[in-house]
Amino acid sequence: MPVNADIIAWARQRAGFQPNDERILKQFPRLAEWEAGTSRPSYPQLERLSEKLKVPLVVFYFPEIPIVPDARESFRTLHTSHFDAIPPKIRLLIRKGQAFQISLSELNGGRNPASRLITREASVSATDSVDKVATEARRLLGIDFEEQFSWRKPDDAFKAWRRAFYKSGIYVFKDAFGKENEEYSGFSLHDPEFPIIFVNNSTTATRQIFTLFHELAHLLLDTSGIDTREDDFLDDLIGAPRRIEVLCNAMAAETLAPDRVFDEVFDELDGSALVQSASRKLAIRMAAMFSVSREVMYRKMLRRGMITQEEYQLASDEWKAQRKAGGSGGNKYYSWTSYLGREYISLAFERYYQNAITWEELGEYLDIKPGNLERLEDYLIRSSA
């Protein structure tokens, strides 16, 4: 049976590989010939190509390129060249996120179960001040600073924020983006009913928290977004896209540590005396109180003229060298619970016990082999007790 050469080219491009990409040409040196239709892959080669590009094998025999949602359409702030540069692993996770949105719709009967969907309740725009957007976000999330300061460690803070996002109608998923994609901290996928956020589990807990709020800003502004460690792509943006990206970064920092509260804590700690002799220790201490990164605190201190640009850069470089990714200790059930979230897993099991889905469908919704479902449920119950 002849394969469709156009679909081979489409699948390669959709997966994020350029025509001259060595990562795929090493495995398929005659790929250009297959795309041109001058030769055809053998069936075993096609099987391997299907796995590499994450496309069902049968699709290569379709008469026409299938019509599927194009994720780039909702990433309104990204320049075309920036979207094209997104690596294959991240593109795959974006497609996985789209699949989760479909699953959420099916499991919930097409309606978000949250009593108040934050993306509908919020009244903000890209022209609003950072303070207004941050204040509105905190109001709708319903977490005050007394509760925020009670969290003992960043992991506790992330879990608490994640629960608040869920109650506000936003599901948060996690995954390991891979060492080669460490510059990507996460992304969001906008949807009128089921907006979601995907977080890189390989980053520190404080960075994951920052990503939550960077992406929340995107969703409040009715757009999907991608959070990266470096903001070099901002130089290529103009107009509304640039305003949105700048606002998202500023809003994340202001929501987690508003200037007003920062000043109060700074005065209580007698920061004026400490900043002269131990500015880094002061930043670390305040970061722990707010459950944010040291860089966020130091950036605020830089903006207020408390430290120099040179000192900020020196500290930032030093902390970057010290930074190490966290892990789950090798427990796959812990990882699954962390990646999917207790709320999503519980929702799927609930629908199974209501006879709304089969055991096999439950495995598909959770992207887990049916043979592991009982142990996952047991882990969920024991870890909640």
Image: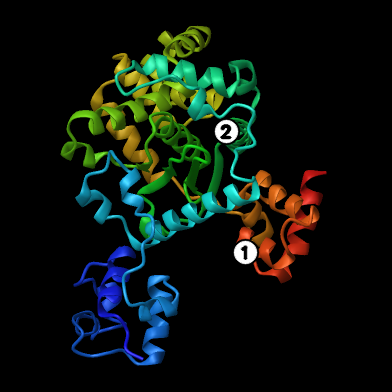
Residue drawn at 36 percent across, 20 percent down: 300
The reply to whether callout 1 and callout 2 are in contact (CB within 8 Å) is: no
Q: Earlier in the sequence, mark 1 or mark 2?
A: 2
Residue at point 57%, 33% (across, down): 165
Instruction: Determine whether, in the image, residue 141 is placed left or right of residue 42.
Output: right
Q: What numbered label is drawn on residue 165?
A: 2
**Residue 90 image position (x, y, % from top left):** 39, 56
Label 1 residue SS: helix
Residue 22, relative to residue 181: is it above or below? below
Whether residue 331 is visible: no
Q: Nearer the viewer, mark 1 or mark 2?
A: 1
Residue at image location 43% in from the left, 57% down from the top: 95
Tell me the element at label 2.
Answer: helix
Quarter of the image for residue 43 reads bottom left
Density class for disc 2 (Cα within 10 Å; few <14, some 14-19, many ≥20) is many
**Camera-side residue of 265 and 129:** 129
> Residue 93 appears in which quarter of the rendering?
bottom left
Where is residue 39 drawn, in percent x and y? Answer: 22, 90
Amino acid beneath label 1? Glu
> Which quadrant of the figure contains the C terminus?
top right
Residue under label 1: 364
Q: Nearer the viewer, residue 374 or 332?
A: 374
| 164 versus 59 height, above or below | above
Q: Nearer the viewer, residue 13 or 235?
A: 13
